[in-house]
Image (tube, rainbow, N blue to C red):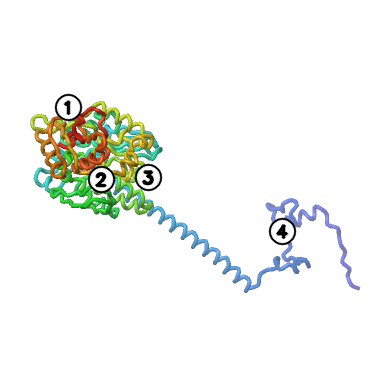
Amino acid sequence: MANKKTHKRMTSADQARLSESRYGSGSRPQPGIADEPRTTRRSSSAASDPRLQAPSRADGVESYRRKQRKKGRGRVLRGVLVSLLVVLIGAGVALALYVKNIDDRLRDDDVVNDTLIEQLDQVEPQEPFYMLLLGVDKSAGREDEWGDDTSNFRSDTIILTRVDPPAQKVTLVSIPRDTLVDMGENGERKINDAYALGGAAYMTEIVADFADVRISHYAEVDFEQLTSIVDTIGGIEVTLPVAVHDELAEIDLPAGTQTINGTQALGLCRARHAYDEYGGGDFYRAANQRMVIGAIVKKVLQLDLVTMTTTVSELADSVTTDLSALEILSLVGQFRNLDADNDIYSGQTPTISEYINNIWYELPDEDAWQEMLERVDAGESPYSDATQDFTAGVAGSIGGHTNISDADESDAGADSEAAALEPSFVGSVSVLNGAGVSGLAGQTSEALIAAGFTAEAGNAPQTVSTTTVYYNDESHAAALGVAQTLGIPEANVVPNDGSYTTAYDVVVVLGTDQA
């Protein structure tokens, strides 16, 4: 008879003994966690869900490949990002070195030294400021003969410049090199002596005192390098009212609008004997220098940023300044909308020529100089009246503007009837010497007689700085002919208000500008 198994209910004590025999006396299952069986039977739902099934060998290989591809893409992406970072850092370093190289060439330590930096008065960004612009003759021949010490160089071009970014205005005021100024312990001297005495710092100090302004920045252009500046930007366009021929300056240009290269621009900035027949060649040369600067500014503002940066780098060998490359580019960026033909004002210090101890000096006309400075500081044209610019119509000018502020233009222009008059070369002329130069009235009379006028020489009651042509009654056309013969601007032709004799058709009062 088969034995029947008897099932004895297991007590809690028996369960404890069984557990101890399985896990040992030091190990017990955690409460609430059942002992896992060695094998597990899948439920019907698990068997039907492919996500819960173990992958086949083929599926496993493909899964491994997918994981490896993801890892590979991650490594490539990280590599690209690292490479890009290296390139950016490298480009940043290269740019920094490029800019530093430009700055090193812009700032000549012999010129822009601690003394000059202390002399400059910094202003807040976007505030109008004054800048001293010098043209210094450092020609190779001069260095070979006299050496390269600062005392051997001449600052023949002295331009006080007011820069007004908010108003988009730039004003250039030439200070004649022969202007007599008080240099304190160095005595009274021509203003261009300051550079020889103490370099850029002392010149800045003297000009600041003379104009009673704070000068914030300094720039110096070597005349010999002017050619590279103009050639770098592809030449400049200028308009010359009369032909310019000067053998000493090696320049021969016809009248009219034309594009000139660097060599021609340099000759134009040096030519003063081209204006000997008009007198005061330095004044006309200074006007041409301001025209050239204006033309350079106009051309530079037309460049795109990349070309402009390259241009600044190339110009660094020709210009010495306290401004950095980034400051220059920032300043240029602020003036991108500048209308160079109308928003650049130009003028020169009003002076009276005096011949003292066999030397010509320019004595500042204090009242006129003070009035001009007030206008400039207010952002207006240096001239309140067109007749004050005696170089107009002979020397070049910036753009086509009349150089008179908009508020004054209506009063300064000539009427249409006068503009339509044709010059006449017949009539009687009284030539009065107001320049204080012996024989000047006689020479001028001879020139007028050769042109067809009858003329007599005499002396003016006092010395004047600007030559003026006065006409009586219906002699306006004759006065224009006189002005054209002598190279006097038409703006200087005015009706006689009774100050001079009416016995002649025309009265010419020669000023020191004709000396």
Label 2: which secondary element = strand
Horizontal side of 406 relative to 321 (left or right) equals right
Classify 10 Å Cα crowding around label 2: few (below 14), some (14-19), many (20 and above): many
Residue at x 89%, y 68% (from the top left corner): 4
Residue 482 coordinates in the image, percent (x, y): 20, 41
Labels in figure, total: 4
Amino acid marked by disc 2: Val
**Depth check, front residue: 438 or 239:** 438
Residue topped by disc 3:
339
Q: CA distance from mark 2 to mark 4?
A: 96 Å
Residue topped by disc 1:
462
Amino acid marked by disc 1: Gln
Amino acid marked by disc 4: Arg
Q: Is residue 371 above or below residue 443?
A: above
Q: CA distance from mark 2 to mark 1?
A: 44 Å
**First in residue order: circle 3 vs circle 4:** 4
Classify 10 Å Cα crowding around label 4: few (below 14), some (14-19), many (20 and above): few
Label 1: which secondary element = loop
Image-quadrant location for residue 188: top left
**Depth check, front residue: 491 or 212:** 491
The numbered mark at residue 319 is: 2
Residue at x 9%, y 33% (from the top left corner): 438
**First in residue order: circle 3 vs circle 1:** 3
**Depth check, front residue: 185 or 439:** 439
Q: CA distance from mark 4 to mark 1?
A: 135 Å
Residue topped by disc 4:
22
Residue 458 coordinates in the image, percent (x, y): 13, 31
Image-quadrant location for residue 285: top left
**First in residue order: circle 2 vs circle 1:** 2
Amino acid marked by disc 3: Asp
